[in-house]
Amino acid sequence: MNPYILAILLFGLGLGTTITFASSHWLLAWMGLEMNTLAIIPLMAQHHHPRAVEATTKYFLTQATAAAMLLFASVTNAWLSGQWDIQQMTHPLPTTIITLALALKIGLAPVHAWLPEVLQGLDLTVGLILSTWQKLAPFALILQINPTNSTILIILGLTSTLIGGWGGLNQTQLRKILAYSSIAHLGWMILVLQFSPSLTLLTLLTYFVMTFSTFLVFKLNKATTINTLATSWTKAPILTSLTPLILLSLGGLPPLTGFMPKWLILQELAKQDLALTATVAALSALLSLYFYLRLSYAMTLTMSPNNLSGTTPWRLSSSQSTLPLAISTAMAICLLPLAPAAAALLTP
């Protein structure tokens, strides 16, 4: 892609998100979301591959549907209450429709079906943008409207954690596994949103760090399926020994960064007398942990086939810069000791 066009598209992505962040009027927020969608579409379809074009079309249709729902709900809100301010959502009907529209935008279950399919058709770099940056603007809006209907948030959160764990079990494609991982993490964020918005933000940031690290590892190894991970130990042995730690951090195991948000969320849910919800969420985390362990096993404990197609990939060195990978890996593994500081910041 022409670097000037790429720069314009990335600027459009940044501008769309910034407009949504800065807006207090529903029309302006909607415009920012639309800019975001339109800027990423050429990036998604840049390799003129049928799979990429199909993924782009699916993405465009779902995002357009969500944007139309959002516009409809905000007009309804203006009609019912006479004002367009994002933080003045008083009527339950538009608030619920907007919550569902934003859930469709970020890919929460039960409106998640587009996310694995779309992510599977993209290359890893655009997939990374879709999994991280594209979640920011809708999340800013969800945090601002502070949905009053607690039942719908808990249902969205629990179905997302369960489907995110269940859907990833039988997958062999890494991008689909990462999509289901994304759905499960988003479910955790939505569960605690109404009780502690700052904790949702902390979970989102730790999820970004861990996902960034995972995508860069797969990109360095040029891996798209579980089988191709087996050649990575010959290519980058130190990175291969660290990758299971990143994956287990995504799963939320104790000495690693990913344990911090899960621990604080379960603590908050228990404080709110939602012990059953907390139990179901914790059990669904075990489902996710299974497929992270499966990836770790394939990467570190299996030998790659010693034939021509198996030995060619690791002879080719990658041109990818390793500094972002090094920083994000260190953050994905080592930030748990900051948990008391995070907990202190989160308490109002």
Image: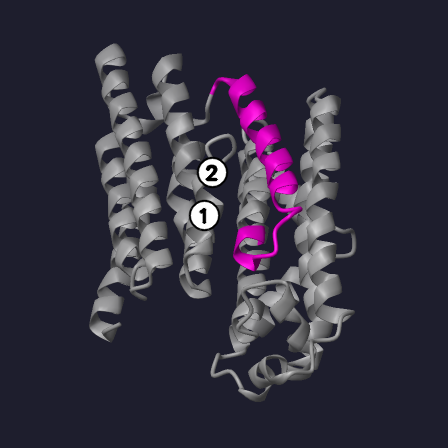
Q: Is residue 173 above or below residue 243?
A: above
Q: Looking at the picture, which amino acid does disc 2 mark?
A: Ala
Which residue reaches farthest front?
307
User: Residue 117 shows which numbered tag?
Assistant: 1
Q: Is residue 146 above or below residue 205?
A: above
The Cα atoms of the two marked residues, 1 and 2, are separated by: 7 Å
Labelled pair 1, 2 in contact (Cβ < 8 Å): yes
Q: Residues within 10 Å of mark 2 (few under 14, many from 20)?
A: some
- 19 sits to left or right of 334: left
* Camera sees residue 125: yes
In magenta, the rendered stretch is: 148-177
- 89 sits to left or right of 72: right
Q: Is residue 308 above or below residue 173?
A: below
Q: Provide the major secondary structure of the magenta segment.
A: helix
Secondary element at tag 2: loop
**Which corner quadrant holds the C terminus?**
top right
- 172 sits to left or right of 240: left
Location of mark 2 (residue): 113
Q: Position of residue 226 (x, y in %)?
A: 63, 63
Name the foreground residue: 54 vs 232: 54
Secondary element at tag 1: helix
